[in-house]
Amino acid sequence: MEIMRSGHKARLAVVTGAVLVTGACGSAGGATSVSARPAPLSQAVAATATATPETPETPAATGSPAPGATGTPAPRVPPQTLRRPKADEPVRVPPPKLSDFTYSFPVQGCRVTYQSQLLVLPKTTIWAAKGCSFVSPVNGVVDEVNVKNRWTASTDRGADREGRFVTVVGDDGVRYLGGHLERVAPGIVPGRRVTAGQILGQVGNSGNARSTASNLYFAISWKTDPSLWWVRRGMVNPWNYLDAWLNGNRTLSPRDEMTAVRNRTGAAPRCATLCASKPKPKSKPTERPPRPDDKHITVGTLSGG
């Protein structure tokens, strides 16, 4: 009897399991042969709210742990210093040749300063220590030489204001003046052939520069008769050429500009600035001619004949 009950229970369990399996398959696969009662709406909403969203699977790390994950600080890498490769020396390109002449700055062996603007006359004052060398700016021939300081404040003659000076007429046809010299170099006489850079004298403060620091009065003009001293003292602004001869292109020539100025003014222009030696004294008012009846006047008569 007990055995029959056990067999009945076993069959009942098998049937129940089959029914459950069939119901599950009907719900998942949507089969129409098996119907299932839908769950109440409140249970469906609750099930949706409490459902856990799926998360993508994270692959297992196969490498070494991240720095600091085990509590050990990561090693510090010192910064790398980038060193530039050593550059080659710059290639010095000579300046273009602007003329057939090569010039020298007129003061050599000393520190110099000069103004690059027109003050009164088209010339410049090159400030330099006394005794510095005044040299010929270009190959040429010595034109005028004054070895005596004839200037005096009482007369202030225009022809004497540069004191001791030397002029050179260059192979470029331009005349160059160096004045206020301390002395003229031995052997420098009119007609002497000189070369660019050859010493002509020493910087000083002769002439009307006796109360100033030593300097070189430098001027550019063209050859004239010595009586036209106002031409000799400067007709062309010289500083652009001095700049080039000192720091740039030593072939920059004033020849074209000198020629243009000479064509404009004429070869023998009249003096227009600082011409008089001293201001002329004002003339006294002309006295009235004496009357014929004055006692100290003898009046004669013209005889006919």
Image: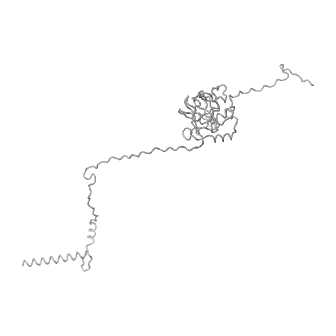
The answer to whether residue 305 is above or below residue 95 is above
**Residue 221 screen position, x and y as percent:** 65, 36
- Looking at the image, residue 181 sits to the left or right of residue 284; the answer is left
Quadrant of res 185:
top right
Q: Quadrant of the C terminus?
A: top right
**Front residue of 147 and 210:** 147
- Residue situated in front as seen by the camera: 295 or 217: 217
- Quadrant where the image shows the N terminus: bottom left
| Residue at the limit of the structure toward the front, as seen here | 193
Count of labels in the image: 0
- Res. 119 image quadrant: top right
Going by the image, does 292 lie left or right of 230? Answer: right
Residue 29 vertical placement versus 212 (above, below):
below
Q: Residue furthest right?
A: 305
Residue 20 shown left or right of residue 134 in the figure: left
Expressed as whole percent of the image width and height from the top left, the position of residue 271 reads 69, 34
Taking the view exactly as shown, the residue that stands out farthest to the bottom is 33
Q: Where is 5 relative to 257, above or below?
A: below
Give the left or right position of residue 136, taking residue 15 as reference: right
Q: Nearer the viewer, residue 218 or 98?
A: 98
Between 122 and 22, which is closer to the camera in this rendering? 122
Q: Quadrant of residue 283?
A: top right
Q: Where residue 68 sits in the image (x, y, percent)?
A: 27, 51
